[in-house]
Amino acid sequence: MQIFVTGGTIDKVYNPQSGELQLNGTQIPAMLERARIGGVEIELETLMLKDSLDMQAQDRDLIAKACEQTQHQQVLITHGTDTMIDTAQRLAVLQSDKTIVLLGAMIPYRIAHSDALFNLGAAMASVQCLPAGVYISMSGRVFPWDQVVKDRTLVKFVDA
Amino acid sequence: MQIFVTGGTIDKVYNPQSGELQLNGTQIPAMLERARIGGVEIELETLMLKDSLDMQAQDRDLIAKACEQTQHQQVLITHGTDTMIDTAQRLAVLQSDKTIVLLGAMIPYRIAHSDALFNLGAAMASVQCLPAGVYISMSGRVFPWDQVVKDRTLVKFVDA
Amino acid sequence: MQIFVTGGTIDKVYNPQSGELQLNGTQIPAMLERARIGGVEIELETLMLKDSLDMQAQDRDLIAKACEQTQHQQVLITHGTDTMIDTAQRLAVLQSDKTIVLLGAMIPYRIAHSDALFNLGAAMASVQCLPAGVYISMSGRVFPWDQVVKDRTLVKFVDA
Amino acid sequence: MQIFVTGGTIDKVYNPQSGELQLNGTQIPAMLERARIGGVEIELETLMLKDSLDMQAQDRDLIAKACEQTQHQQVLITHGTDTMIDTAQRLAVLQSDKTIVLLGAMIPYRIAHSDALFNLGAAMASVQCLPAGVYISMSGRVFPWDQVVKDRTLVKFVDA
C-alpha cells in the first residue's frame, strides 16, 4: 500500500512560539504505530505539506504523477478537506486501474476530539476492499469522488 | 447500520476507587461523535458488557440471534479480542445474507495510544464495502473470519 | 479561593468550521474536575475572553477592580502569556493584602502536550502557600511579578 | 530540586499483552517536558517502582535514607496514594531541614482525565514555597503530613 502525504488539517500542529497551527511534518507514522498494522507493507511518501486552499494545478499534477508511478495498486492520499474533491477529480482523469482513496480530518490529529485516527482507519480499510477508482473516505463513509460534497456548516462530507 | 456492543478491552475504563480497569458502559457513542458521521443511520444496542474470556456459548447464541433479528444488512460488533474469532465462527453458522464485521481494541479507548478509534473507522468502512459474510477488522486489515489469528506476542491480528 | 478567567492560550479551542483557534468559553471547570479538589471552595468568574495581545488599559482596570472586590484572599487569574506581566504590574499598584497569582499556558489545554493542567496545579498550590503579593506561576516556578520575563525563543518564563 | 520516583498509580501503564496495568518505568520526564520548566535544576532518581500497598518498612527506610543523602533542599517524592501518608510519617522522623513533598495520582498519567499533571505542578510549586517539613500535595491542596486522610469513597485527599 502506498500512502502519499500532501498536508491539510490532519497534520497541523501547534507552534507555541507563534501561537498558530502549522504544517511542518506528518503525524501519519505515529498514527500507524497506534494502529498496530498486521501484515500490510506500507510505503509512505510526503509529496508536499500544504493547506489545500493553497494547492495549485501543478500540485495536483504532481500528485497525479505520483499515483501513476507508484508500484502499489492501493493508494491512500492525506489531503486538506477544502479542495480534496478537486484533487480527486484531477486523479479521475488518469482512469487508473488503481484504487485511490483520499482522506483528511476536520480536527487536527493533535487536538482533542480529532477525527483523524478514525478517518485513517476507514480509508485504510476502504482501499483494501474497493475496486479500482477514486474515492473520498470521510465522515464514516466511502464516497465515489463525484458523489460527495463537503457541508461546511455541519463540517461533514455528505452525499452530493 | 446496526452496532452491537458486547464489551471487551475497547470499552474498559479505569475505576479510581478500585484501581482496576472495568466495563461499565460503552465509549462507542463518544467515538461516533468524534467521527462526524455523515448520512449513515446507526442503531446502537448493548447486548452485554463482558471480557471476551468470560463469554459462554449462550452469550454467542444471544449475539447470533441479535444478528438474525436486526433489520439492518450491515452489522458491526464490538468484542474482546481474545475470543473474537470464536464468536465469528458461531456467527458464520448463520449463513446470513448480512455483512457482519467484528472489531475490538488492543488498548482501551480511554488509554493513551489506543487503537480503538482507528479500528472503529476501519470496521465501519469495511461493513459498507464488503459482500455478505463474517469478518474481523483489526490491525488495519479486514480478514475473512477463518483466515485470521491473534498473535499474542506481537499483539496484532495476522493472517492464519 | 477566587479564580478569574480572562482568556489567553490556555482556553483556546479549535473551530472546525473556520480552521482557527478561538476563545469561546473556558476549560477551567473541566480541569478542576480532573484535579479532584478536596476541601477548597472555589468561586469562578469569567471577566473576559481575550487574547492578551488585545488587552487594553481598561481591561486591566476591570481585572484590578475584580481583585479588589472579591471576598477571597486567594486569587488566581488565567491570562494570555504575552502581556501577563503587564497585568501583574497593574495589579501590584493595588498594594492588596491578597495573594494574587497569574497563570496561563504555552499550549492550549485541548492540544496535545499542553502545559495547562500542570500550570493550574502549580498556581493553585502557590496561591495557598504564598504571602500577600502578585506572582506569576509558569514554567514550574513561582516568580514575584517583577522578577520574571517571557523568553519567546525558549517559550518559557525565566528569571528577569 | 530532587525528585524521587517510587511507583504508584501515577506511573502505571497498560500492558496490551496481559491486559493489565503495570509499573515498568516512569512518566515523570515526559510530564516535565510538557511543563517547560524554566530555570530549575532537577535531579530525578527512581528508587523503586512499587504499588504502595506492597511497600514494606525497608522500602520506607530506603526512601528516608535517600532524602537524607540528597544534596537538594527541595525533595519531591512520587508515591502510590494508599500508603503515602505512612511513608510521610516515616520521613517526619528524620526531622530534616529539607522540604519534602509527596504526590501521586488517582488516575494514571496515561489514562484519560488523569490528575497526574495537575498534581505534579502543585507539588513542584509547593516544594519551592514551603518551609522545612513533610507534606502531602494532592487534590489541589498542600497538607502537613499529619493533617490529611485519603477519602476512599470520594477518591480525594481531605483534612484529617
Image: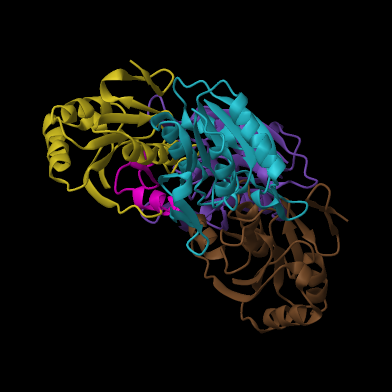
Chain colours: A cyan, B yellow, C brown, D purple
Looking at the image, which residue is at 47% across and 48% down? Answer: A146
| Residue D55 in sight here | no
Quadrant hosting residue C110: bottom right
Residue B22: say if magenta. Answer: yes
Q: Quadrant of the C terminus of chain A?
A: bottom left
**For the magenta stretch, what is the residue range?**
B10-37
The percent position of residue B137, horizontal first and vertical second, equals: 35, 31
Give the image location of residue B100, x and y in percent: 25, 36
| Horizontal and vertical percent position of residue C96 | 75, 78
Give yes or no for residue B105 being in the magenta stretch.
Answer: no
Between A14 and C90, the residue placed more toward the observer is A14
Q: Residue at x 52, y 33 (%)?
A: A95
Looking at the image, which residue sits at the far top?
Answer: B160
Residue B147 is drawn in which quadrant?
top left
Q: Classify residue A148 as left or right of residue C145.
A: left
Q: Is residue C74 left or right of residue B152?
A: right
The answer to whether one can see residue B133 in this image is yes
Q: Is residue B13 above or below residue B154?
A: below
Taking depth in this image into account, of D133 and C21 the one nearest to the observer is C21
Camera-side residue: C148 or A60?
A: A60
Residue B12 spot, x, y in % from top left: 35, 41
On the picture, is C12 further left or further right than D37? left
Total marks in image: 0
Q: Relative to C94, is C6 above or below?
A: above
